[in-house]
Image (tube, rainbow, N blue to C red):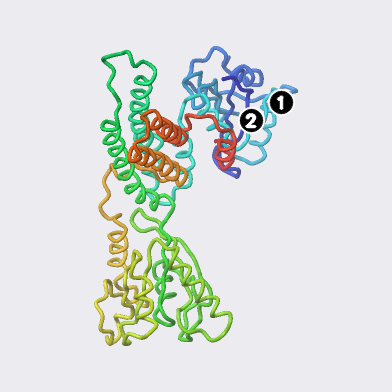
Amino acid sequence: MKFDTIAAISTPIGTAGLSVIRVTGEGSIEAINSIFKGKDLTKAKGNTIHYGHILDKDGSVVDEVMISVFRAPKSFTKEDTIEVSTHGGILITQKVLERILDCDIRLAEPGEFSKRAYLNGRIDLIQAEAIMDIIHATNENALKVAHRALSKKTSGLIENLKNKVLTLIAKIEVNIDYPEYDDAEVMSKEIIYPATIDLLKEIDDILLHSRKTQLIREGIKTVIVGRPNVGKSSLLNALLDEDRAIVSDIAGTTRDTIDAYVNLSGATLHLIDTAGIRDAKDTIEKIGVERSLKAINEADLVLLVLDLSQTLTDEDKMLLEATKNKNRIIIGNKKDLKRNLEIDTVVEISSLKKDGLEKLEQEILKTLQLDNLNDTDFNYLSNIRHIQKLKEAKASLEAVITSIGLDMPVDMYAIDLTKSWNLLGEILGNHSYGDLLTELFSKFCLGK
């Protein structure tokens, strides 16, 4: 596939030791060589670095640079590629870029380098999306998930499923098109049914494990709930180790949800401090309570805070009932005061004195099954697009089982199997669908 030559600044704009400008495409080495004073880059070997100067149109020096040469196909895009390391000033970097663009080279669009790597077969779509996951990772485990995807560990799961589906399709087609071959395996429903059931079990296992990796990548929506004055905002502040929420003895101080992010041992919590749930009197507080109840329904994890120094109230009982089917941790706050609450709480803490927070963190990871992760736990899908496509592929396989139950002809099974195979291919990007590619790569950084 042939493309024009593009260039972009690949490092953040600002004052730094170095800036890197990446250039890729046919003729990129010759173009940069025409404005470079130093070694003849057209004779340079791939994967080499060369010292020299970028020259202006009048022959004056624009900047002292180091030039990295990558020859096709041994480059990120599988094209001839140049990386120009300049001094890291904003003005000088821009001047070098402008000089490069004078050489009949256009400015790259966001994500265009990665898009070319994908289109040229250097990476699949899971790997391409993993590049941005690496850049935006908010914790160490999210970084591990992204690195596994980039190294094709995740792609291997989908490739394996694709191959198994394709084998079934091929055997069915052989029986349909070449019935005279005696050695061709007759693909009756007795053979297709158990093979399809095995595929569905494999997909279910991937989806089950992918829930963990999705939480690691996207963060865990964690709602802090409780009646007024039990210490919800104090808990938020304690976990963040800063005074983010207003704390007072006045009931109803928190009128709306407040959110923040905190890292816990390789997991990112999206903490949401809600308005105290009670029979609100004024309109604003009623809206806050309604939003709190909505946040509970949408949460991955609920931290239900009770006051250890007081007896259980009707509001407490209502919240215990409302959250019983959620991933929930019951927290007994104010352990530094005399205990009057008669309930077995999972974790007892004092938000005010920051006592018991380590135990709470351990319980959070345990509840979400993120406490004893091993290397294979990072191999699964974490991107919502991938997970949705896999669910659609599963639905097509379930349609095969339905067709078998209705005793439909064998050749009808191939239709749904082919649909499932195509959907798995869309996860990897094995098929051409331009609008999706444009949308995906438009979210990338400029120069990546």
Residue at 46% over, 29% down:
123
| Secondary-structure class at tag 2 | strand
Nearer to the camera, 392 or 272: 392
Nearer to the camera, 440 or 193: 193
Give the quarter of the image for residue 220: bottom left
| Secondary-structure class at tag 1 | loop
Up the image or down, 220 lies above or below 84; here it is below
Callouts 1 and 2 close, C-beta under 8 Å: no
- Amino acid marked by disc 1: Asp
Q: Could you tell whether 285 is left or right of 208 in the image?
A: right
Q: Could you tell whether 408 is left or right of 107 in the image?
A: left
- Give the residue number, with chain letter if any, for mark 1: 102
Residue at 49% over, 27% down:
76
The quadrant in which the C terminus is found is top right
Q: Residue 85: percent from the left, percent from the top?
A: 56, 31
Q: Residue furthest right?
A: 58
User: Crowdedness of circle 2 by 10 Å Cα count: few (<14), some, many (20+)?
Assistant: some
Q: Residue 81: percent from the left, percent from the top?
A: 55, 23
Residue at 42% over, 55% down:
219
Say whether disc 1 or disc 2 marks the residue closer to the N-terminus.
2
Q: Residue 240: percent from the left, percent from the top?
A: 42, 66
Give the quarter of the image for residue 285: bottom right
Mark pair 1, 2: CA separation: 16 Å
- Give the residue number, with chain letter if any, for mark 2: 63
User: Crowdedness of circle 1 by 10 Å Cα count: few (<14), some, many (20+)?
Assistant: some
The quadrant in which the N terminus is found is top right
- Amino acid marked by disc 2: Asp
Q: Residue 398: percent from the left, percent from the top?
A: 37, 42
